[in-house]
Amino acid sequence: MTRAATDTADLKTARARLKEILLQRSIRFGDFKLSSGLKSKYYADVRQTSLDPKGAVLIARLLDPMLAEHGVRAVGGLTLGADPIVGALITWTELQGRGLGGFLVRKAEKEHGTARRIEGPFDKSLPCAIVDDVITRGGSALQAYEAVCEAGGNVRLVACVVDRNEGGAEEFAKRGVPFRSIFRIQEFL
């Protein structure tokens, strides 16, 4: 078997295992109000998976090729959904020998200290990706995207673990930014 075939098989296995973990820990059915204001009969609480050691490694393993494909050298997102994903990615990529820089975007500028909105070693010269746990209409990822663009950053990709397929991808397409997800919510319904 060639290296490319082995890598593809490894990614399929990792994706199947991550799906199992998401089904066990993160996908819930009931009545929920989403951060977008929409109501839903299902909820993807991906932090239950991204804060699990196995889940975090699998998420990083599956997002890494997407980031590499777009020449990404740094990764960040809006705090709280992106925090564990950014941590997992910077650790995973360092272990793979190509360590990405990481940063986190606050919802608003700090009113004390350095008064930063973007925390961490953000370098606007590095092509970056915005990551999130779940994207519905894109609100949180859009906030991070806009903050990075305002700071002079070059966003090459927006990626998430679960796309609820409710307009987020289209929001980034309007801005000319590629969008990728590991899963679409329909895969769990």
Image (spheres, rainbow, N blue to C red):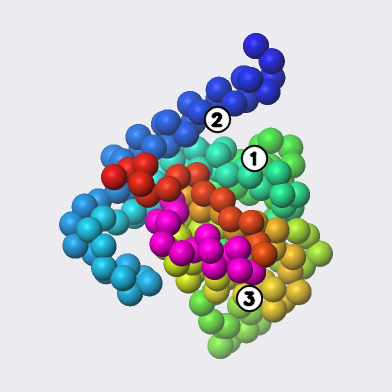
In the rendered image, the vertical position of residue 42 relative to residue 97, given as above or below: below
In the picture, the disc for residue 147 is 3
In the rendered image, the vertical position of residue 108 relative to residue 82, given as above or below: below
Q: Residue furthest right?
A: 125
Q: Residue at x 63, y 20 (%)?
A: 5
Q: Which stretch did the figure color magenta?
A: 162-175
Q: Quadrant of the N terminus?
A: top right
In the picture, the disc for residue 65 is 1
Q: Quadrant of the C terminus?
A: top left
The amino acid sitting under disc 2 is Leu
Q: Is residue 169 magenta?
A: yes
Helix, strand or loop for disc 2: helix
Q: Report whether 60 appears left or right of 176.
A: left
Q: Residue furthest top?
A: 1
Q: Residue at x 39, y 37 (%)?
A: 19
Helix, strand or loop for disc 3: helix
Q: Residue furthest bottom?
A: 111
The amino acid sitting under disc 1 is Pro
Q: CA distance from mark 1 to mark 3?
A: 25 Å
Q: CA distance from mark 3 to mark 2?
A: 32 Å
The amino acid sitting under disc 3 is Ala
Q: Residue at x 58, y 65 (%)?
A: 172
The residue wearing badge 2 is 11
Asked whether the beta carbons under mark 2 and mark 1 sit within 8 Å of each other, the answer is yes
Q: Report whether 96 appears left or right of 160.
A: right
Asked whether the beta carbons under mark 1 and mark 3 sit within 8 Å of each other, the answer is no
